[in-house]
Amino acid sequence: GACAHAQGKFWEYHDILYRHSGVFTAESLTDYAGQAGIDLDTFSTCLESGKFTDEVAQDLADGVAAGVTGTPTFFFNGEKIDGAIPFSTFKQITEAFLSD
């Protein structure tokens, strides 16, 4: 994702990854990058170099430390809510925090 973002194509890549969720290989990730209109030479160099490995590892560690065990997970003023919630519930929670 970070390598796609570096080319301004994060959301395009994101959408393709979610349509093909499962086990990812360097080959499949590169194929999906091509589908997203990402320059493959630049993407492959980024992916192979591990340019964003430390950033991704830190994001993972931060999530684990916060108690995140899956997606989606939401935090409202430090209160964790696991799993998908209906929009109406999300809106109600948000409005309650905003009114405090």
Image: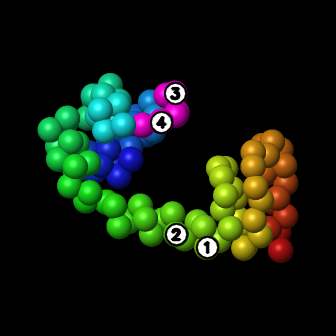
Circle 4 residues within 10 Å: few <14, some 14–19, many ≥20: few
Q: Secondary structure at mark 4?
A: loop
Circle 2 residues within 10 Å: few <14, some 14–19, many ≥20: few
Q: Earlier in the sequence, mark 4 or mark 1?
A: 4
Q: Earlier in the sequence, mark 1 or mark 3?
A: 3
Mark 3 = which residue? Answer: 19
Disc number placed over residue 23 in the picture, else none: 4
Question: For this view, does 41 lie left or right of residue 43?
Answer: left
Q: Nearer the viewer, mark 4 or mark 1?
A: 4
Q: Nearer the viewer, mark 3 or mark 2?
A: 2
Q: Earlier in the sequence, mark 3 or mark 2?
A: 3
Q: Secondary structure at mark 2?
A: helix
Spatial distance from mark 1 to mark 3, Cα to Cα? 29 Å
Q: Magenta stretch containing residue 19, yes or no?
A: yes
Mark 2 = which residue? Answer: 61
Disc number placed over residue 65 in the picture, else none: 1
Q: Quadrant of the C terminus?
A: bottom right
Q: Nearer the viewer, mark 4 or mark 3?
A: 4
Q: Are marks 4 and 3 in contact (CB under 8 Å)?
A: no
Name the residue located 84 percent from the left edge and 64 percent from the top edge.
96
Q: Nearer the viewer, mark 1 or mark 3?
A: 1
Q: Amino acid at mark 1?
A: Ala
Q: Secondary structure at mark 3?
A: helix
Q: Secondary structure at mark 1?
A: helix
Q: Position of residue 49 (x, y in %)?
A: 20, 55
Q: Is residue 36 among the parts visible in the rendering?
A: no
Question: For this view, does 31 lie left or right of residue 97?
Answer: left
Q: Which residues are magenta?
A: 18-24
Residue 100 versus residue 31 in the image, above or below: below
Spatial distance from mark 2 to mark 4, Cα to Cα? 21 Å
Q: Position of residue 23 (x, y in %)?
A: 47, 36
